[in-house]
Amino acid sequence: MSLAACPPASKSNDVDRAVVAFTLLTGARDSTIASMKLKHIDLVANRVYQDAREVDTKNSKTFTTYFFPVGDGIREIVEKWVNYLRESKLWGNDDPLFPATKVAVTEERRFRVVGIDRKHWSNATAIRKIFREAFQAAGLPYFNPHSLRNTLVHLGETVCKSPEEFKAWSQNLGHERVLTTFCSYGEVASARQGEIIKSLGKPREAESMDVKQLAQELAREMENQKSDLTRVIRE
């Protein structure tokens, strides 16, 4: 899907494009995005601070996400939106990163969108609506915001060349353990499965992944999870 499917004809549509771009750039959950403030995004350091004291994160966990390498064009959409809020609207750190739509009553006594309001969305429903309309505009079936986290996991499986790299990628999604990333986000697509199996039959100059190190990492993760489960049962 191209973000051009969200035409920048108004600031409301700019919000739509920025929301989709930000979701891909950070992998943040829709409830997190709905509650995020301007101060949580750092365009200089290319990161987002998901502060559980102010942001709705899963399991109330605080962590930092660095922008995923998904293309400069995606980042530019987000940067343009942030600059608009700070420089044109003169909004401050505690204002919402993605504000609610402002609705007014017209002379004909009808409700009409008149811009953006200086308050957060009450929940993630508006974000899911943005995704639904964007996919419809692109002529594609609907995929919810969480599906972009799946996309980022698959991208990580392709670009990461060591256990350490994939561990960092996993932490960037907010997962404490790499096993969560491996086990909780679907399976390898059939076409990709075929590519991998075919490539394994060809001579390779060097291994891109240290298999022994990866196996050791997974073994540690499984042992940690087993220990956590035992502790929970005892408690």
Image (spheres, grey):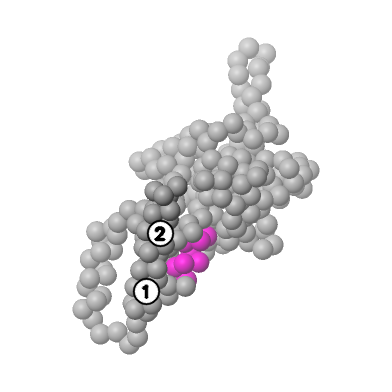
155 vs 7, nearest the viewer: 155
- Compare residues 128 and 63 and report the one nearer the observer: 63
Q: Is residue 145 above or below residue 126?
A: below
| Residue bearing mark 1 | 216
Is 171 part of what is drawn in magenta?
Answer: yes
Give the image location of residue 2, x and y in percent. Answer: 46, 50
State the residue position of label 2. 227
From this view, report whether residue 195 is shown above or below residue 104: below
Secondary element at tag 2:
helix
Residue type at mark 2 is Ser
The reply to whether dot 1 and dot 2 touch (C-beta < 8 Å) is: no
Describe the element under mark 1 as helix, strand or loop: helix
Q: State the image coordinates of residue 196 (x, y, percent, origin top left).
A: 27, 70
Q: Is residue 151 above or below residue 14?
A: below
Mark sitting earlier along the chain (1/2): 1
Residue type, mark 1 in image = Gln
The residue at 64%/24% (across/down) is 103
Q: Which residues are magenta?
A: 165-172
Residue at the spot 25% in from the left edge and 85% down from the top edge:
203
Q: Counting other residues with Cα less than 10 Å from the Cα at mark 1, is it few (<14), some (14-19), or many (20 or more)?
A: few
The residue nearer to you, when weighing 148 against 89, is 148
**Residue situated in front as seen by the camera: 50 or 99:** 50
Q: Comparing marks 1 and 2, which lies closer to the viewer?
A: 2
Residue 194 in the magenta stretch? The answer is no
Q: Using the numbered discs, state the Cα–Cα distance from disc 1 to disc 2 in whole angstroms.
A: 17 Å
